[in-house]
Image (cartoon, rainbow, N blue to C red):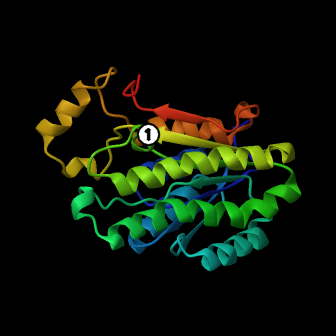
Amino acid sequence: MKLLENKVAIVTGATRGIGKGIAELFADQGADVIFTYVSSDEKAKALEHDLLAKGVRARGYKFDVADYKMCETIVADIVKEFERIDIVVNNAGITRDTLLMRMSEEQWDEVMTTNLKSVFNMTKAVQSTMLKQRSGSIINMSSVVGVKGNAGQSNYAASKAGILGFTKSVALELGSRNIRSNAIAPGFIETEMTGALDEAMVQTWRDAIPLKRGGTADDVANLALFLASDMSAYITGQVINVDGGMLT
């Protein structure tokens, strides 16, 4: 028996990195996977093809999860086609890094809207379906930066810290209906984005981590799988770091 057999999952921002890793692992474990993306049609088609090849239903939706009305509309379409929603992974996010003295209002608003408002939008949109089912797992992607802060990332850190407060509040509101809400706080995860960075700098970061390596998308996806599955049926309102001991 696969861990997510007969479950329907939504993963936002899933055409690369952590989101892609989660979508693929969920499909491997039997979930039908709906994913969102905003730019690359080519990557989305490739991911949809790969997911379908795993023997599950899959569908990519191109839209901005920062758009409240679109979230409502798309979720209604998903419920009509897939009949239920068991898991939501709020993973979509961006960075606009700069020191506060140089940060524009637009850079602040863009990060807060994409990273934090999108979590409200999608959670609000799926809430009624999960309440009717009396079950569901909401998984919100935060960051160790949201836990400890980081110079040059006040907008990103604020958005990711906001996710933590939201996650815990939703856990308290929806726990009586068997709907769980947890957050994952990844540390230094090596993805396509970090591949473009200076190797010497990246090695310095690795050396500062107790496990002496950067994390992988699979490291994060494995925790998301646990939180999505019935194995974590008594876990809600938690923030779990996936950081190789960075914040120890």
In the image, what residue occupies the spot 55% across and 44% down? 25
Image vertical order of residue 30 relative to residue 58, above or below: above
**Mark 1 closeness class: few <14, some 14–19, many ≥20 residues within 10 Å:** many
Question: In front: 85, or 60?
Answer: 85
Q: Is residue 119 left or right of residue 110?
A: right
Question: Percent from the top left, x then y, of residue 59?
Answer: 60, 67
| Foreground pick, 233 / 34 | 233
Q: Type of residue at label 1? A: Pro
- In the picture shown, does residue 94 fall above or below 3? below
Residue 143 drawn above or below residue 100:
above
- Please state the horizontal and vertical placement of residue 183, each as a whole percent of the image: 57, 42
Which image quarter: residue 207?
top left
The residue depicted at 55 percent of the width and 64 percent of the height is: 118
| Quadrant holding the N terminus | top right
Badge 1 element: strand
Along the viewing direction, whichever of 190 and 51 lies nearer the viewer? 190
- Image coordinates for residue 181, horizontal then vertical, percent: 68, 45
Q: Can residue 218 be seen in this view?
A: yes
Q: Mark 1 points at which residue?
A: 186
From this viewpoint, which residue is outermost toward the front? 101
Answer with the quarter of the image where residue 70 lies.
Answer: bottom right
Relative placement, left or right, of 54 versus 188 is right
Asked if residue 139 can be seen in this view, the reply is no
Q: Total of numbered circles in the picture?
A: 1
Q: Residue at x 48, y 58 (%)?
A: 14
81 left or right of 168 in image: right
